[in-house]
Image (tube, rainbow, N blue to C red):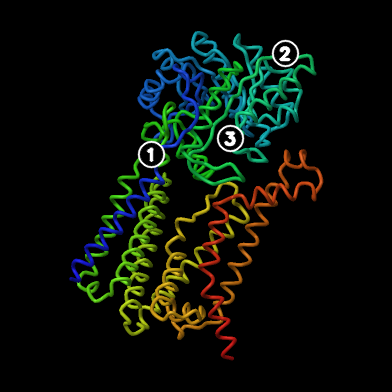
């Protein structure tokens, strides 16, 4: 009879879990299909893991793949192995050739010379030239030096010449409008000082283009405008109401192309392929702006519905497989667990399996180098070990086994490790968090573990004395330490610092100040953007749950004194 109960519980959990997975992974409407044909232009940089510069065969392979997807590619540099016009000609692709400028004058000199030589040698392929990319945004040189390079190239070539930067820098340095043949602006709603939700992104782009056009006309200049970069990240850190996701990336691209078709905008999408090397400079979000992944597969379709996670059946299968291994490991021990407790234990085991597979999947796909993969393996191993300890403690509670002091000691050690880990991550996010993702997946098992143990002990004792529940179920009454309060205090301070850091980042941004010049005028908007961030709120929730037992332990300790 016990075997039948176990089988029925297994069947129930699998059915419910499968139904939930199917329901939350339904295809989503990403807007109108892109009109038949190619994308006007794509930012292109051929990169492969293990290669500092791309090989000619890499460039050839990538441009062959893009030939039926775009008319033009925009490149950013001549030196350093960027694609040559000869390969682009081979596949009938035009080029917007860029020359990279930075703070090194000698490098700039060589780059400009190579740029002039290349575009003059390939006038049938290189249709436009962009001298410098976001130089003023990075503050690599003064405006006069930049203008000098632009004039040097314009005198030496026949193709139209421009300079590319975020749109606000063309407003800040309007003299650039007089120096270029066409105006190249970057409009990235995700990165705006006031992040724009994907639903409003197309309207925002239309508004900005009109604003730049009006500025140029007011100076007596009626010049073409190229949206030199526009796109949406498929993975990474949320900013205000701007949420990275596969579906949102598809929505943005489709809406932009629809807008360009209606308004006859000249645009370039960033970018053709995801760029792993950017993770060192812009975090996970910087590496995931491509229409194609690093393995050259489409991130999303341009027609039809879009799946946020098209591989969800595999994810479900792996989760179920891990869960069944856990059930097999407990084997006969589950036969001594009563029906309701058995079902509760199986549900908890399945929840831990979901968290673990989700963590491993996300971390591995967000790892682009050897050290990042080593870190992923370490984090997954630590979470696996803690999950094992938590499941053992849950089982002991359900069968009324005596408290195991050795198990309590190990749980305490595990939670101290994750507390220190959370401290490091929280303060990193607070003081240097612009490009860092909120690692909610890495704290999901520790946070779920606290809730699970409290639930299990309540189930057994039907007692609402939460102080005793947390103490006896998590780390034992024999492990009180004055350092716990310090650790919990540091977590609390870090959470406050994180919130203040987010608010400050918005309120000190140049465009935000221009739009909301007064402190009290801008504060409500900064608060709204900060507390709309669901990833931030999820991280704060994990911190609260994780530090809760340590606060309670100190409260109990004081009560006893």
Q: Where is residue 118 in the image (x, y as percent from the top left)?
A: 52, 15
At mark 3, the secondary structure is helix
Q: Nearer the viewer, residue 71 or 262?
A: 262
- Which residue position is annotated with label 1? 50
Q: Nearer the viewer, residue 465 or 140?
A: 465
Work out whether mark 2 precedes mark 3 in sequence or the reverse, and give the earlier one: 3
Residue under pointer 2: 222
According to the image, label 3 marks what residue?
Answer: 199
Q: Kindly indicate the quadrant of the structure image that contains residue 404.
A: bottom left
Image quarter (top left, top right, bottom left or bottom right) of the C terminus = bottom right
The circle drawn on residue 459 is none
Report x, y in % for residue 4: 19, 66
The N terminus appears in which quarter of the rendering? bottom left
Alpha carbons under labels 3 and 1: distance apart: 38 Å
How far apart marks 2 and 3 lie (CA) works out to: 30 Å
Seen from this angle, which residue lies furthest bottom?
A: 561
> Does the residue at mark 3 contact the one at mark 1 (Cβ under 8 Å)?
no
Left or right: residue 253 compared with residue 350: right
């Amino acid at each position: 009879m016990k075997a039948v109960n176990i089988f029925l519980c297994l069947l129930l959990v699998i059915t419910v879990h499968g139904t939930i997975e199917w329901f939350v992974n339904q295809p989503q409407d990403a807007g109108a299909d892109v009109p038949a044909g190619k994308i006007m232009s794509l930012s292109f940089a051929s990169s492969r893991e293990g290669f500092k510069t791309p090989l000619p065969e890499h460039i050839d392979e990538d441009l062959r793949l893009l030939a039926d997807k775009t008319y033009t590619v925009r490149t950013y540099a001549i030196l350093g192995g960027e694609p040559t016009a000869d390969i682009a000609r081979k596949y009938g692709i035009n080029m917007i050739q860029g020359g990279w400028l930075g703070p090194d004058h000698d490098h700039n000199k060589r780059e400009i010379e190579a740029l002039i030589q290349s575009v003059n040698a390939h006038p049938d392929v290189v249709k436009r030239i962009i001298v410098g990319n976001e130089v003023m945004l990075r503050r690599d040189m003064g405006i006069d030096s930049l203008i000098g390079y632009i004039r040097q190239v314009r005198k030496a070539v026949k193709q139209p010449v421009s300079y590319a930067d975020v749109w606000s820098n063309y407003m800040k340095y309007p003299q650039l409008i007089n120096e270029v043949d066409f105006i190249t602006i970057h409009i990235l709603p995700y990165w705006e000082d006031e992040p724009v939700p994907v639903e409003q992104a197309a309207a925002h782009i239309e508004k900005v283009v009109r604003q730049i056009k009006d500025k140029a006309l007011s100076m007596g200049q009626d010049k073409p405008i190229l949206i030199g970069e526009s796109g949406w990240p498929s993975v990474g850190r949320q900013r205000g109401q701007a949420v990275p996701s596969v579906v949102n990336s598809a929505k943005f691209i489709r809406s932009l192309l629809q807008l360009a078709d209606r308004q006859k905008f000249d645009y370039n999408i960033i970018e053709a392929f995801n760029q792993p090397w950017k993770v060192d400079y812009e975090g996970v979000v910087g590496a995931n702006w491509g229409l194609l992944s690093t393995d050259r597969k489409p991130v999303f379709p341009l027609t039809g519905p879009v799946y946020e996670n098209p591989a969800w059946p595999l994810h479900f299968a792996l989760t179920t497989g891990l869960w069944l291994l856990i059930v097999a490991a407990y084997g006969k021990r589950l036969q001594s667990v009563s029906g309701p407790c058995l079902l509760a234990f199986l549900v908890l085991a399945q929840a831990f399996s979901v968290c673990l597979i989700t963590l491993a999947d996300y971390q591995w796909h967000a790892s682009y180098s050897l050290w990042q993969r080593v870190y992923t393996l370490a984090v997954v191993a630590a979470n696996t070990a803690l999950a094992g300890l938590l499941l053992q403690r849950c089982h002991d509670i359900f069968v009324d086994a005596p408290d195991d002091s050795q198990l309590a000691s190990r749980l305490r050690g595990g939670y101290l490790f994750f507390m220190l880990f959370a401290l490091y991550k929280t303060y990193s996010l607070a003081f240097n968090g612009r490009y860092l993702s909120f690692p909610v997946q890495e704290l999901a098992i520790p946070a779920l573990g606290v809730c699970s143990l409290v639930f299990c002990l309540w189930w057994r004792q039907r007692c609402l004395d939460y102080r005793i529940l947390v103490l006896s179920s998590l780390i034992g009454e024999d492990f009180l330490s004055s350092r716990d309060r310090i650790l919990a205090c540091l977590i609390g301070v870090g959470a406050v610092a994180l919130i203040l850091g987010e608010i400050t980042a918005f309120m000190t941004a140049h465009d935000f100040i221009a739009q909301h010049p007064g402190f009290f005028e801008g504060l409500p908007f900064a608060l709204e953007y900060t507390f709309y961030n669901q990833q931030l709120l999820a991280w704060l929730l994990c911190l609260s749950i994780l530090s809760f037992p340590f606060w309670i332990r100190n409260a109990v300790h004081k009560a006893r004194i």
